Amino acid sequence: MSSRVLLALAIGVMSVAALTANHASAFCRMTTMGETQIGEQACVEDGDFLEWPIACLPYAIDERGSSSMAFDEVEQAIDLAFATWEDVTCDGEPVDLIFKPRLSSTCKRTEFRNPGGNVNTIAFLDPWEDQCGRAFSRNALAVTIVMFDSSNGRILDADMLINDALGPFAQCDPDLGCEPGTQSNPGPVDLQSIVTHEAGHFIGIGHSDVADATMFPTSPRTEVSKRDLAQDDIKAVCTIYDLPGNLDDNCEPYVINGFDLNCEDDGPPNCEGGVPVPSSGGCSAVEASPGKTPWSALLIAMLTLTVLRRRSAPRDERS
Amino acid sequence: MLRFRVLLGLSGALLVALITASSAHGSIVQALDLSELVAQSDRIVVGRVVLSEAFQRRDGTIATWYRIEVERELRSDAPTRDQEPEVIVQVLGGQVGNLGMRVEGEPRFTVGERAVIFMEGDRQLAFRPVGMAQGVMRIRMEAGDETVFQSRQGLLLVRRGPDGLLKQSPGALPQKERLEAFLERVRTIVREQAGAAGE
């Protein structure tokens, strides 16, 4: 083999490697299998991609809002964050993704009911624990919890929880940013930036290594640029919701088993059980019932019902 | 010789391409340095994952228990005579039947893998990793050495600066490290903190 052929081969392989690296360093998608990331390893996308089957997505903000912001300011920041993703255009056409802000919820917790209605709730928690007093990681500012059908990656429900104890939060000036504070009296965190990032997870986007992407991990407290999507974020949402113009403002909001804005109306949560027994040769738990519920049949039935029940609905229930 | 150089170049190009590949970030979490990880831990163990079991809570959410066979105990909330050879770690998310739940930033384990785990919680219930995936240092063999890596699954790590601003942070273990050297650092911090508490 001549040196020229080898050189051409080298250039070819380098090009392929560069292209591969370029792909790997862009956005990643959330998947059913998750990932076991080691050090700086690239994203692992085993399993099916997580994706809403009908991207006409309602959400509702818990009526108790945040302790550091007026409720209308919270609404404004969150609506703008979701609208940022909805306003994307893919090759000149609106992305196949519409958000439906609903009336406020009474749902200060993550919950998925089946049977029973559901709501994609956005809630501020202080104390930072679930309804049974089980603490989330005290260091987390915000988490998005996504329920999905693991047989096909269809997202069924998503809730966003924000740690109100790590505020204060604010709708900061888009030009000047948030006011800086001190160690003992920290300045506010820009809520819109936080929610824009978390909304990416809400729709199935994992993360990105592109420095100016909303899904890239730079979030100085005063920075508000993460409100704006980068080309990589746009590529991500256009890849996932890739039927531009398929939905219109009258689309039927997708929710499993119908809306229930009040997830607390069935009384105090049942927190019994859940105690493992490590020395007995296996785990036992009152709550545990893995693999015993015919979820796939239930889900298929619910999805069928949802499709049959599709009706016109206003773009924004609040307006 | 020329072929060897070209092949060497090819390997280098591939290596550069792989090095520029991404890291994962999701939930926004305050970064903890090693002293903070130790301080927030009720128990620190080196262990092997021997079993996992996902279960659905009554509120419909899913959590997963991992049974960890303890190889070494670095900090315990119990006297030595009462220490158990196994510990249960619970994380949010998992799969039950066809229903799955993901929380970006929560660690996942593979049965059989080994890790250093910084845990908080009550032994009567399950422990939880400190700082979500930050509290899990996975052990891998590299060139014959046991090496630890900090897991940053789906984490966006930030720290509050002196001016109150949040800045991106590398976390407790920015670079991989030999297991024994890392454990010695942890033991030193445990001793220092125990000494400070006793004064």
Image: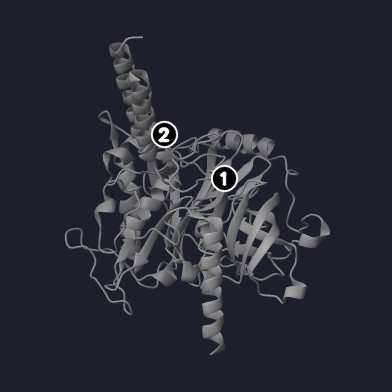
In this view, the residue in front, A102 or B110, is: B110
Question: Residue A289: horizontal and vertical position, in percent?
Answer: 75, 50
Which residue is found at the position 33% from the left and 42% from the top? A86
Q: Determine if residue A157 is in view.
A: yes
Which residue is found at the position 57% from the left and 33% from the top? A152
Chain hosting mark 2: A
Q: Secondary structure at mark 2?
A: helix
Q: Residue furthest top?
A: A1
Question: Residue A104: horizontal and vertical position, in percent?
Answer: 44, 59
Chain hosting mark 1: B
User: What is the image's colouring?
Assistant: one colour
Amino acid type at image mark 1: Gly
Question: Residue B16: horizontal and vertical position, in percent?
Answer: 35, 36
Question: Residue B115: horizontal and vertical position, in percent?
Answer: 60, 54
Asked if residue A63 is positioned above or below residue A50 in the image, the reply reads below
Q: Secondary structure at mark 1?
A: loop
Residue under label 1: B144
Kindly indicate the quadrant of the structure image that contains residue A63: bottom left
Asked if residue B97 is positioned above or below residue B26 in the image, the reply reads above
Query: How many residues crowd mark 1 within 10 Å: few (<14), some (14–19), many (20+)?
Result: few
Amino acid type at image mark 2: Ile
Q: Residue furthest left?
A: A175
Which residue is found at the position 50% from the left and 59% from the top? B134
Q: Residue furthest right?
A: A280
Looking at the figure, which quarter contains the N terminus of chain A? top left
Query: How many residues crowd mark 2 within 10 Å: few (<14), some (14–19), many (20+)?
Result: some
In three-dimensional space, the C-alpha distance between marks 2 and 1, rounded to whole angstroms, equals: 42 Å
Residue under label 2: A240
Asked if residue A95 is positioned above or below residue A184 in the image, the reply reads above
